[in-house]
Image (spheres, rainbow, N blue to C red):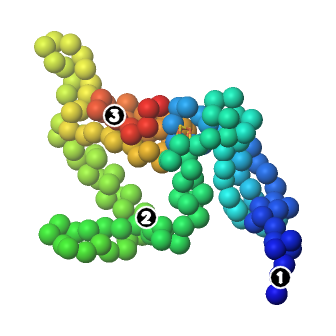
Amino acid sequence: MSETIDITARIAGAEKVVSVCPYCAVGCSTLAYVDDAGTLLDVEGNPESPISGGHLCPKGSAIFGLTVNTARWTTGKYRAPYSDRWEDRPVPWLMERIARRVKATRDATFVREVDGKRVNHTLGIASLGGATFGVEENYLLGKLMHSLGVVSIENQARI
Ligand code: SF4
């Protein structure tokens, strides 16, 4: 039977990596703990963060649970029209399908001019980014959408 004095923190001996919360423009600093195998053990607020002093909001506090979570889906899901169930599909299959639909919608709705002014946009596609997108993902998404002429671009996090 182990004594209380023998119990150690699960992050004892782990490497501490200074990082940043990926979710919003506040940019709270975090501490990520990894073991020798590179497995993430925990993520917490960094007390040296000049912005948050070690605190994380509810979203930032969930970084570890989002990353290490046995309930998280790891395969692509597809629900066919009129179906009541999700089916596993390979990610390349899903990407191909999405790309074809984006192309068809853009071709059908792209507008070059409005009232004699060049606009080169489509109002047939909108982009809604999730709060779990990081800064770099949002940057790339913005680039992609602008290149397609999409002007309705929104994200839950204010970046
Ligand atoms: S989502 Fe929360 S914890 Fe993350 S940077 Fe924004 S305020 Fe900080």
Measured as percent of width and height from the top left, residue 149 is found at: 31, 31
Which mark, residue 2?
Answer: 1
Q: Alpha carbon of mark 1 to alpha carbon of mark 2: how far?
A: 47 Å
Q: Residue at x 76, y 48 (%)?
A: 17
Amino acid beneath label 1: Ser
Amino acid beneath label 2: Val
User: Camera-side residue: 33 or 97?
Assistant: 33
- In which quadrant will I find the N terminus? bottom right
Whether tag 3 and tag 2 are in contact, CB under 8 A, the answer is no
Tell me if residue 28 can be seen.
yes
**Mark 3 highlights which residue?**
153
Q: Residue at x 54, y 67 (%)?
A: 69
**Mark 2 highlights which residue?**
91
Residue 93 higher or lower than 151, as above or below: below
Residue 26 higher or lower than 137, as above or below: above
Whether tag 1 and tag 2 are in contact, CB under 8 A, the answer is no
Q: Quadrant of ligand 1?
A: top right
**Label 2 environment density (alpha carbons within 10 Å; few <14, some 14–19, many ≥20):** few
Q: Residue at x 21, y 33 (%)?
A: 123
